């Protein structure tokens, strides 16, 4: 957020609102710290995919959090490299994109319908 504000791509008021929203989410989130296990998973991801280090840590935390329940897991990302790596690791990616997932059935938006279907990570 700070970078796009410095670059003049977003108004200061919008950035302030975004920081406030982030603060609100951080108060309610379970934050996974980069312990040795997370670092090792991230290092392995960096060897497999063209990710940035921070993205590898985010994906490693999600993999650690979900364990064997990846088929039920959603991963939120906008970066294409991170989205692709998360898909290849078994996550369903949000926001939904046709080039990553098969088209949803008619009448299905492709989005989870219950808040329990989504866990936000990497805040």
Image (cartoon, grey):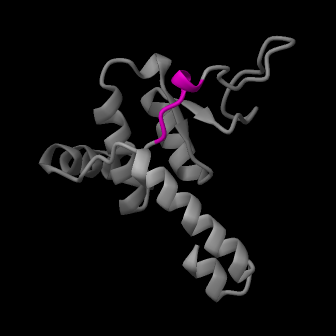
| Left or right: 77 in relation to 52 | right
Closer to the camera, 104 or 108?
Answer: 108
Image x and y of residue 47, in percent = 31, 50
Q: Is residue 116 magenta?
A: yes
Seen at 86% across and 11% down, the residue is 106
Pick the quarter of the image with the N terminus: bottom right
Is 13 situated left or right of 54 in this image?
A: right
87 on left or right of 64: right
Residue 65: x and y in percent read 31, 33
The stretch in magenta equals 115-120
Instruction: Mark yes or no: residue 123 visible.
Output: no
Q: Percent position (x, y) of residue 94?
A: 63, 36
Q: Is residue 68 visible?
A: yes
Location of residue 42 with respect to 91 vertically, above or below: below
What is the x, y in percent for residue 37?
16, 43
- Quadrant in the rendering for residue 14: bottom right
Taking the spot 65% from the left edge, 23% from the top edge, the residue there is 112
Is 54 one of the magenta-colored residues?
Answer: no
Q: Residue at x 59, y 54 (%)?
A: 79
């Amino acid at each position: 957020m700070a970078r796009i504000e410095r670059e003049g791509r977003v108004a200061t008021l919008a950035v302030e609102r975004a920081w406030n929203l982030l603060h609100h989410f951080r108060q309610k989130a379970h934050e996974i710290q980069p312990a040795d296990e997370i670092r090792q998973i991230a290092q392995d991801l960096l060897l497999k995919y063209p990710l940035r280090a921070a993205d590898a840590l985010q994906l490693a935390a999600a993999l650690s959090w979900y364990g064997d329940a990846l088929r039920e897991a959603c991963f939120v990302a906008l970066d294409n490299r991170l989205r692709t790596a998360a898909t290849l690791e078994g996550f369903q990616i949000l926001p939904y994109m046709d080039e990553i997932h098969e088209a949803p059935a008619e009448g299905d938006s492709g989005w989870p319908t219950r808040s329990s279907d989504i866990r936000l990570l990497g805040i």
